[in-house]
Amino acid sequence: MKLIAKYFIILTFLVATQTGFSQVAAPYQVGTWQGFRTCAISYTFDDGCAGQFTKAIPIFDEAGYKLTLFTISSWIKDWTDLKNAALSGHEVANHTDTHPNLTGMAVDKQEAELKTCNDLINLNVTNQQCLTMAYPYCVKGNDALHKKYFIVARGCQGFIEGKTPGDMMNVSSIMCGAVGSVKLVKDFKGKADQAANQKGWLVYLIHGIDNDGGYSPLSSDTLKASLQYLKANDAKFWVSTFGNIGRYVKERNCVSVKETLVSDASISIAVTDTLKKDDWYNFPLTFRRTLPAGWASATITQNGKPVHSSVIEVSSVKYLQFEAVPDGGTVVISKADATGLNDLNDFQKGRNLRVWIDGNSLLFKVPVSCLPYPTLSLFSSNGMLVNSFNHCQIDGGIGKVSLETMRKSEVLLVRLSDNQSTWSSQIFIQK
Ligand SMILES: [Zn+2]
């Protein structure tokens, strides 16, 4: 009996270790991947081949997806393309300073390779931090050094990782293009489907594009078609940078959710993780909570700011689905139908605001009687607050707010208000 109890304790411990001490219990769930999608896919590009900038980035920008550029810092003469890529949300990451084979190199020389590259990237590309790397020739160097500088690092063992890679400092990737195993559109579709079956993380490794002279060239048409396939199956595939998916995995495996204050109309929760560097681990995880009985909807904020949220139904159970950054401040879930929008029907009837889309911005014609610095709020079609902009900047009677953080296609209800009046409209955004 004692022996059985002992084994049971060991078994429980092993299970806890495997899952990394995540403590997300009912009524909460954390998505294995963002948006509770089935699998994750990263497109990573090495060595700065010309076609990555002239062909790949425009294709990704058009699809609304982000890629990772593993950069050899001593090869960069002009940082403009990398700066612009990062400003569009792509990741600029470390591929060492001079592309040496790290195996067998003295540890201080290895550190100089990693640090010089990080420093040059961070000096020249200032809207992100360089926190991931890819090994030249796919061979690891000193593990402790990699862990000191990086969240996650990439090798190229050729398989699809599971929901948590066995070694975050040697995540497998699959070579694409002429000498790789993934060349044609059907190869990309096959790998993506396989990743979905495994509910895992698929990382592609790409060098040359078309005839740019880069190693193992891949056709830009094939690349484009591969993204169209993922886009057509958006509910299944989460496409994001190597760094963001690496962050998601590590945060998800040690996140805890705890309700700290509960009333009839509001629930406060603490979302925390055990990772020490909050400035590295600042990526939102996706959560679900069963919709409290008697609630129609909710507005959700973290640290006072609206977060992406929606009401969804799975197997006839209604959930609030929302995003929150571990250790990013208190999450407050407030009962809605009254707070966000006074009455959804009234709102949709009285549209008197002129709004339109220009690129990544939403513009609106400011009503003549509107006071300076009004607030513009965006709601989803079921009345959830999506985003709110205080003190809107107005130029020549036209106001403008950014839709950068919006995803997917959705109908938005738009409300403009000053201290005295409100105006409203409805618009369909497509990204
Ligand atoms: Zn390389």
Image: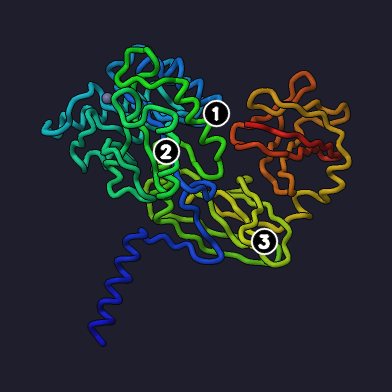
Residue beneath disc 2: 190
Asked which quadrant contains residue 268, the reply is bottom right
What's the amino acid at mark 2?
A: Gly
What residue is shown at x 12% (from left), y 31% (from top)?
Answer: 105
From the viewer's side, name the closer residue of 231 and 124.
Answer: 231
Residue beneath disc 3: 266
Label located before the other in sequence (3 or 2):
2
Vertical placement of 102 versus 217: above or below? below
Asked which quadrant contains residue 77, the reply is top left
Q: CA distance from mark 1 to mark 3?
A: 38 Å
Instruction: Give percent across and percent down for residue 13.
Output: 30, 68
Furthest-bottom residue in this view: 1
The answer to whether residue 29 is left or right of residue 420 is left
Q: Quadrant of ligand 1?
A: top left
Asked which quadrant contains residue 156, the reply is top left
Query: Which part of the image, by quadrant, shows the C terminus?
Result: top right
Q: Which mark is residue 177?
A: none
Instruction: Give percent across and percent down for residue 394.
Output: 74, 24
Within 10 Å of the Cα at label 2, are there few (<14), some (14-19), or many (20+) other Cα atoms?
A: few
Instruction: Give percent across and percent down for residue 126.
Output: 43, 26
Q: CA distance from mark 2 to mark 1?
A: 20 Å
Asked which secondary structure carries label 1, the reply is: helix
The answer to whether residue 101 is seen in the rendering is yes
The answer to whether residue 48 is seen in the rendering is no
Instruction: Give percent across and percent down for residue 11.
Output: 29, 71
What's the amino acid at mark 3?
A: Ser
